[in-house]
Image (tube, rainbow, N blue to C red):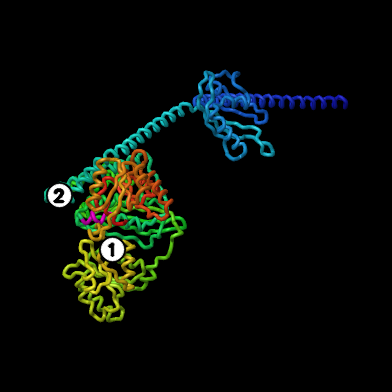
Amino acid sequence: MSEEMLKKIQKLELENQVVRLASQQWEHLQKVYQESIDRLQVIERELSSSHERTDRALFGGDLAWWDWDYKTGKICFNENRSRMLGFGVDELPQTYTEITRMIHPDDFENTMTRLKRHISGAYPNYEAEFRLKTKTGEWRWFFDKGKVVETDILGNPIRLAGVLIDIHERKSIENELVLARDAAVAESNSKSNFLVSMSHDIYTPMAGVIGMAEILKQSKLSQEQEEYLNIIVKSATNLMSILNDIIEFSKLESGKLELHEKPFSIHQVIEEVTGSFVDKANEKGLEILSFQDPNIPVEVAGDPVRLRQILKRFMDNALKFTDKGEIKIEAHFISWDDETVKVRFSVSDTGIGITEAGMAKLFKSYAKVDSPESKKYSGGGLGLAIARRLIDRMNGHITVDSNPGAGTTFTFTVVFERYKETEVTDPMRNILQGIKVLILDPNTNRRSILANYFVRWDAEVVESAVPEDALKLIQHRAEINKPFDLIVVEHTMPGMNGLKFASSIKHETWLKKSKILLTTSRQTAVSSAELTSAGILVALVYPYTISRLRNRIKEVLSQIRKSYSGEADEVEAHLMEDQKKVLNILLAEDNLINQKVALVTLEKIGHHADLAENGKIAVDMFTKKSYDLVLMDMFMPEMDGLEATKQIRLIEAADPGRNPAHICAITANTSSEDEEKCYAAGMNSYISKPFRLEELVKILNHI
């Protein structure tokens, strides 16, 4: 074989090898292609299935997706949008401007505002509820939600995408609920207004009953007749209390109650509440104890009317369910920060207590504790429910501690705002710091209250319950040259009263550096002569209010002597005949029964009264004659008491030489809001119908 032939054979074999290799690659490419086709078909089937599921989900959830080209304004969406609005796919507008024209005019501005805020970056998402008009002309509610999904290099939006959700049924239910709520509120308000209007109609005849009964009590009556009259007055008063609770509770239920915050003194509120219950407690043979933590700021910011109302509720409850022992009202400073002051209040009694079952229904509306002991006590079961709701409104917290037969303690905390303008250092600390004090009183609670005061004023306090032990302490301290600077002695003690105790030691040489302060109740009044004879400078009548205690301590330590014949804050009786000033009084009252009651009462007391049948007549009479006191009804024809008071104050302002009259509101409305309206109009005091003789006498005594 020639060399040339051999080269041809080798070339053919090489070409054949290339052909076989190419064939093998082609077969591989065909296989890869087929596999790719198979995978693509699987992906297409999965995408189709996913698309179907998405469509079903969008359909089932009443959802429609949309995709908005922000530059061109064109919006794409799926057929669900057409179905939800009742249009064909080709019938719906395709641009943003055209679609916004379908939005209800009342919803358009809010929707556009929300969209613009999202696009500007103020909101992370765009969300809006609006109504769209369907093909049939019906307005249906939709919820639209989306966001910017693509931006340019400057952050400007290119595309937005989101979903449209049909919420028409939900909005229909919401609207029905709103209408039902509004109807319920309207009905509740109607009931409240009815109760308020009816209260005046009920108060008026009740005022006549109680007023005439009080007048009859001033007549010569047999013991039996007097008992009957007392029953009439007590029954009518209980009925009025229940009615007041119902009206107050109806206001709370209807949401009409509002808090009116202003600077006020917690100390003053405690003293007012304490003083208002002393006489009632004395009638039952109970003792009222009071403690006001000197660390509580002079003034705080809050609602004094509501605080007073809460405390009175608990005091009423304590007085009702306590037949022997004592009732204690306290206010303790807890803490403060730069903005707030936290104070704890408590009212304790030694009454019948509350069972475990009774505790469960204690603060429920129209629910009364049902026990053999409580059945004899009247009430509507609303007082404590009202107190709890008021505390809740003041962001407070209440707790109850009670043992059946051993009494009950209601405790609640309230956070007030600090009123720094009146925060000053208590001067009593400077007066009493380091002063050595001995407290002699067999009553543990009274002794403890006095000790708490002195300790907070940085005095050194020693307590004693027995006169003999106190004498030993006094002698011992004198012997070691550390005598007591102040000895506080209770008047009523077993074996030896306070006067005898003081008399027994007044001549002792070791007592020369000590001052004695006598404590006593209103029932055991002590004359000035008796005090002088016993070597006592000052007497303190309890309950110990902080202002009274401060004054007496200052008097005794500075040796200022005051006659103990009765001071303004301790004696509530009317002036004696030879001391009494005859007052010119204008009675503005339109009701005949109330006119008769008031005029007869004033005549019996010995004052001169003129009658005005409405506010306009009262103003005319006031321009012609000067009056010391105006008793002003709030609701009268032609001109009510509030407007009449304003007119009278203008008359006085125009005549600087005229002495301002004391104007006292007499009204059937007992709410704190009405009381505030009276003071805002220019009135000086406020008593509710039916007024009691002693309430009117208190007003007369301060003129």
User: x%, y% of residue 461?
Assistant: 31, 70
Count residues near mark 1 (Cα–Cα under 10 Å), then give few for <14, some for 14-19, many for 20+: few
Label 2 is placed on what type of residue?
A: Glu
Residue stretch rendered in magenta on the structure: 276-282
State how far apart marks 2 and 1 are (Cα). 31 Å
Q: Which mark is residue 286?
A: none
Residue that numbered label 2 is attached to: 226
Among the 4 quarters of the image, the one containing residue 264:
bottom left
- Left-right relation of 457 to 120: left
Q: Secondary structure at mark 2?
A: helix
The residue sitting at 27% across, 61% down in the picture is: 570
The residue sitting at 36% across, 69% down in the picture is: 458
Which of the two labelled residues, at mark 2 and mark 1, occupies the earlier sequence position?
Answer: 2
The residue sitting at 38% across, 43% down in the picture is: 257
User: x%, y% of residue 614?
Assistant: 33, 41
Determine if residue 389 is in view. no
In-front residue for pair 267/177: 267
Residue 386 among magenta residues: no
Q: Does 701 appear above or below 2?
A: below
Q: Are marks 2 and 1 in contact (CB under 8 Å)?
A: no
Among the 4 quarters of the image, the one containing residue 327:
bottom left
Q: Quadrant of the N terminus?
A: top right
Label 1 is placed on what type of residue?
A: Glu
In-front residue for pair 538/404: 538
- Left-right relation of 606 to 74: left
The residue sitting at 34% across, 66% down in the picture is: 550
Q: What secondary structure prevails in the magenta region? A: helix
Residue furthest to the front in view is 624
Q: Does 53 appear above or below 321?
A: above
Q: Does 107 appear above or below 652?
A: above
Q: Which mark is residue 567?
A: 1
Determine if residue 682 is in view. yes
